Image: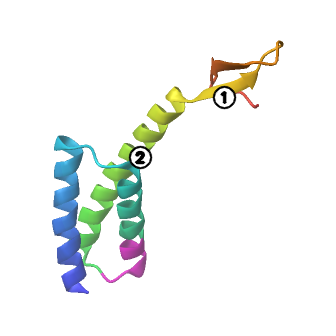
Amino acid sequence: MAKEGSMAKEKGANTKKKNTQVEIPFEGALERLEAIVRQLEAGTLTLDESMALFQEGVGLSRYCQQKLGEAEAKIDLLITGKDGKLELKPLKLGENS
């Protein structure tokens, strides 16, 4: 299991580099975040390994929240107008459809 922790540190360093240099896909960040949670829940890591993974996880969580916010801001709703034609309307956040 110590080997996993070492690999996690290496992966974590790579992910951090990608976050600052190259944008990673949302799905990839989410998968990595889920893997971090599994490793932390297993309870087999040292304190230092756990702290490093936790820090990486917080960064990934913020990244995912940012990406979701950006996507939400771009969402448009297609609705049928009075004349029966589809209209494009921006989604008003916080409203129930």
Indicate which disc residue 7 carries.
none
Q: Which residues are magenta?
A: 38-44
Q: Residue 78 at what x, y percent from top left? A: 68, 26
Which residue is more in the foreground, 22 or 49?
22
Element type at marker 1? Answer: loop
Magenta: main secondary structure? helix
Is 45 positioned to the left or the right of 81 in the image?
left
Which residue is more in the foreground, 10 or 82?
82
**Which residue sits at x=48%, y=35%?**
71
- Depicted 34 relative to depicted 64: above or below: below
- Depicted 34 relative to depicted 22: above or below: below
**Which residue sits at x=75%, y=31%?**
96
**Which residue sits at x=34%, y=52%?**
60
Residue at mark 2: 64
Indicate which disc residue 94 carries.
1
Q: Amino acid at mark 2?
A: Cys
Looking at the image, tell me whether mark 1 or mark 2 is earlier in sequence order. Answer: 2
* Residue 92 in magenta stretch: no
Is 61 positioned to the left or the right of 50 in the image?
right
Which residue is more in the foreground, 77 or 93?
77
- Depicted 78 relative to depicted 33: above or below: above
Which residue is more in the foreground, 81 or 18?
81
Q: Residue 10 at what x, y percent from top left? A: 16, 67
Q: Residue 14 at what x, y percent from top left? A: 17, 58
